Amino acid sequence: MATGGDQGGSIRIPAAACGIVGLKPTYGLVPYTGIMPIEFTLDHTGPMARTVYDTALMLEAMAGYDDGLDPRQPRDLKVKEYTALLTGKIENLKIGILKEGFGLESSEEDVDKMVEGSR
């Protein structure tokens, strides 16, 4: 388990490249107190771990209202029991796919076809 800082993918991209799980939490969910900010509107701190369960468990430990020094955190911030939400049920799950993200000059045609074929 590790903590990462994410402004433009610095948790998610390394996690994906290493075969682990990285989560960029909702803005203000995890306090940023004590971490050197780059830009308050972009900064996020989040968990990185080997499994989804471990990532959820670490988020439970990290998330929540801290000491009042992070102006992005509401005082009535509620933290869910994220590990309990890992039921594996995906009924009625909707995934949005941005049409404009396909067919670009930099796109890989086989990836475009695979994603578009899974709709």
Image (cartoon, rainbow, N blue to C red):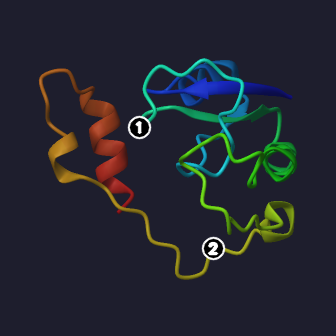
Image quadrant in which the N terminus is located: top right
| Residue sitting nearer the eye, 18 or 72 | 72
Reply above or below: 24 against 74. Answer: above
Q: Residue at x 34, y 35 (%)?
A: 111
Residue 76 in the image: state x and y as whole percent.
68, 69
Residue 12 is drawn in which quadrant? top right
Amino acid beneath label 2: Ile
Q: Residues within 10 Å of mark 2 (few under 14, many from 20)?
A: few
Q: Residues within 10 Å of mark 1 (few under 14, many from 20)?
A: few
Is 57 left or right of 88, judged from the image as shown?
right
| Residue sitting nearer the eye, 39 or 119 | 39
| Residue sitting nearer the eye, 76 or 84 | 76
**Which numbered disc flags the more N-terminal residue, 2 or 1?**
1
Mark 2 vs mark 1: give the one in front: 1
Which mark, by number, is residue 52? Answer: none
Q: Residue at x 54, y 22 (%)?
A: 37
Amino acid beneath label 1: Thr
Mark 1 lies on residue: 41
Is 96 left or right of 3, judged from the image as shown?
left
Which mark, by number, is residue 90? Answer: 2
Reply above or below: 65 against 23. Answer: below
